[in-house]
Amino acid sequence: LDATATPSSGRLQWSTRLSFILAATGSAIGLGNIWKFPYITGENGGGAFVLVYLACILVIGIPLMMAEIMIGRRGQQSPPNAMASLAKEAGSNSLWKIVGWAGVIAGFLILSFYTVIAGWSVSYISVAADTTFVGKSPAEIGSMFESMLNDPTRLLTWSTLVILVTLFIVGKGVKSGLEKAVNILMPCLLVLIIVMVGYAMTTGHFMQGVSFLFNPDFSKLSGESMLIALGHAFFTLSLASGAIMTYGSYLPKSVSIAKTTIYIGIVDTAVALLAGLAIFPIVFANNLEPSAGPGLIFVTLPIAFGQMPFGTIVGILFFIMLSIAALTSAISMIEPSVARLVERFKISRFKACTLLGFSLWLLSVGSALSFNLWKEEKLFGKTFFDMVDHLTANLMMPLGGLAIAIFSAWIINKKVSQEELGLGKGVMYNIWLFTMRFITPICIVIVFLNALNII
Ligand code: PFF
Ligand code: NA
């Protein structure tokens, strides 16, 4: 945010179109693309899952991202108030603010486990720097990861550090430095992933990886897998979690919401698919299991770093970039809560961060311990980490998305969406409206009922 660019409404604004794109792309690209997408794809059988995920991005994620940015920019407040004021303007019920609240809370909950995984990434910077991957067998690299998971102190140290850094940056409200960092580091991350894809091509199992990712076998696709694919489309685009709506509220009027959204959607999807192309050939070349779970990238990529030329430096850089990508996403998850507290209680950003920090940290302890001391403490067969992940990605975000679709296409005045989106008033606008009115809600409902075995 650039505090000098204060518009007449008095609200902070992004200094340029580029800053918004960078911040929103920074929010979107993160652990979701590089850590979560490959491991859930592996757990859910590959190709058919990827196809459902891509379809969800296209028909649900992209139009919904436009809707969220629009609500934020038009509302000029935190998500709950933005939704309440647009509802009021349209003569509807102010209870719509609950949907905004659900998003803010979802973002906060996600952050509580996101910081733990980001901690793994930070920790692996030093593991890579100790040249610990070189000359190690896949089994040895696997047990290195296991021993990290089994060390609660180590996990808590790093996740606490991630929380402190995130809150410090958000508390200061200085984003301009960070925007510039994103501008340089995101392309670097992309280059590194492409280098890893290049390495994957030399493993002799590249085509097996390609076929795992893109050859759909629908017999492997359960109703639950479809819900996970849908939930991940929200997660990866930072939707229904307050982030994009809040960032949208800082967006200058002159920027085309439609163009910006399409750009973000394409880049985010490309990074996820490239990460998959880098990882699965290594999985098959080393006889690992695609369904290895959350540790997948922390085992496969180090194998590659241990074998490829300049692997140590590539490994160090990779985990640095991944940690920064995670940080820019983490910042966007807590920003909605901070914005709301500041707006409501007129306290400083720093105070708001301190207040939120403690409860955030407590929740993160629950996730960190889910991998060791509390591994066997399960409710409905799920650890604390699994539960928070499931609750947000497979319940709160799809339902929140459903509500936002209905709100943006049925409740608020058509004039508002026509003015805001930058799609004109013709065919493109009508496609958006029809999708948001019918296709998106129907798809979400079908996926839900199907996952619950009702249809
Ligand atoms: N989109 C981020 C990723 O793919 O890593 C995760 C995320 C960021 C989810 C912000 C939700 C959010 F509000
Ligand atoms: Na993402």
Image (cartoon, grey):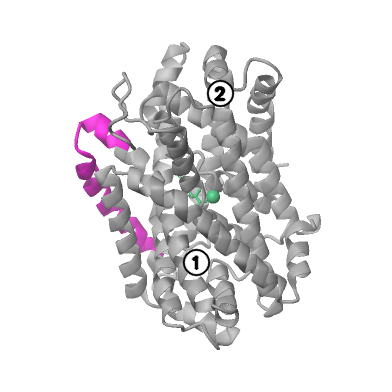
90 within the magenta span: no
What amino acid is labelled 2 in the image? Answer: Leu
- Residue 323: percent from left, percent from top: 43, 61
- Residue 75: percent from left, percent from top: 41, 23
Write down the residue under mark 2: 421
Q: CA distance from mark 2 to mark 1?
A: 36 Å
- Residue 392: percent from left, percent from top: 49, 47
Callout 1 secondary element: helix
What amino acid is labelled 1 in the image? Answer: Phe
- In the image, taking residue 333 as reference, residue 48 lies left or right, namely right
Q: Is residue 136 above or below residue 207?
A: below
Write down the residue under mark 1: 318
- Tell me if I can see residue 108 in this picture: no
- Residue 236: percent from left, percent from top: 55, 48
Q: Are marks 2 and 1 in contact (CB under 8 Å)?
A: no
The residue depicted at 45 percent of the width and 37 percent of the height is: 20
* Residue sitting nearer the eye, 237 or 240: 237
Q: Is residue 251 above or below residue 389?
A: above
The numbered mark, 2 or 1, whose residue comes first in the sequence reads 1
Q: Which residues are magenta?
A: 339-367
| Quarter that holds the C terminus | top right
Task: Name the chief secondary structure element in magenta.
Answer: helix
